[in-house]
Amino acid sequence: MRVMVAIDESDSSFYALTWALDHLFINAPSTVEGGEGEVGMVTVVYVTQPLQHCVYPAGTGGATYYASSSVIESVKKAQEESSAALLSRALQICKDRRIKAETLILIGDPKDKICQATEQMHVDLLVVGSRGLGMVKRAFLGSVSDYCAHHASCPVVIVKPPRGSASSKK
């Protein structure tokens, strides 16, 4: 079975990753003789927003300011470092549980990119975390998990954070 777990900077997405590893891979056959080895495989996906090359000031005048190439490169480098740190953390969680993992970084709208990736990679199950947004916040901000549940080409498991956690109170 091909499992994809979408992560972001939130604790709830890492909780979803650990939940998936602990609950979906418990009976997977070992890949090393003797029963001691890694089991199963998971794809961890992270979607970063595309870089905006211009800034529109909030004041009057309507002028558009374009970022210099050095600023753009600096922001790109910071995005890459942030992505690498998140995926490194996710890979360590998988390694600790002796589960093989591959990573995927996409650029664009997380809702669309995650759904496209599930279709292109023929994923059997998508696991996403829930930030616990209320109805009003979800209506204004949108919900990646809700969108994926309705548009992904495979079954979707939405993992809610444990009761009483800081991310479930937001």
Image (cartoon, rainbow, N blue to C red):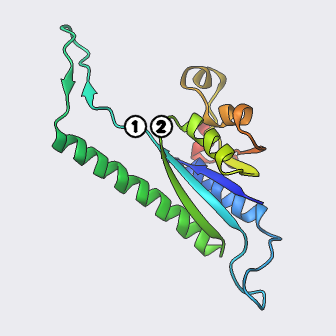
Residue at point 42% right, 59% down? 84
Q: Is residue 11 left or right of residue 119?
A: left
The amino acid sitting under disc 1 is Pro
Between 60 and 121, the one nearer to me in the picture:
121
For mark 2, what is the residue? 108
Residue at point 20% right, 33% down? 67
Q: Is residue 54 above or below residue 13?
A: above
For mark 1, what is the residue? 50
Between 65 and 12, the one nearer to me in the picture:
65
Q: Is residue 146 above or below residue 156?
A: above
Q: Looking at the rendering, which quadrant does residue 169 occupy?
A: top right
Q: Is residue 114 above or below residue 96?
A: above
Residue at point 55% right, 20% down? 140
SS at badge 2: loop
Between 84 and 20, the one nearer to me in the picture:
84
Q: Are marks 1 and 2 in contact (CB under 8 Å)?
A: yes
Whichever of callouts 1 and 2 sits on the residue coming sooner in the sequence is 1
- Residue 38, label in figure: none
Q: How many marks?
A: 2
Neighbor class of circle 2 (other Cα within 10 Å; few <14, some 14-19, many 20+) is few
> Extreme front residue here?
120
SS at badge 1: loop
Q: CA distance from mark 1 to mark 2?
A: 5 Å
Residue 83 x, y percent position in the rendering: 42, 53
Residue 6 x, y percent position in the rendering: 60, 49
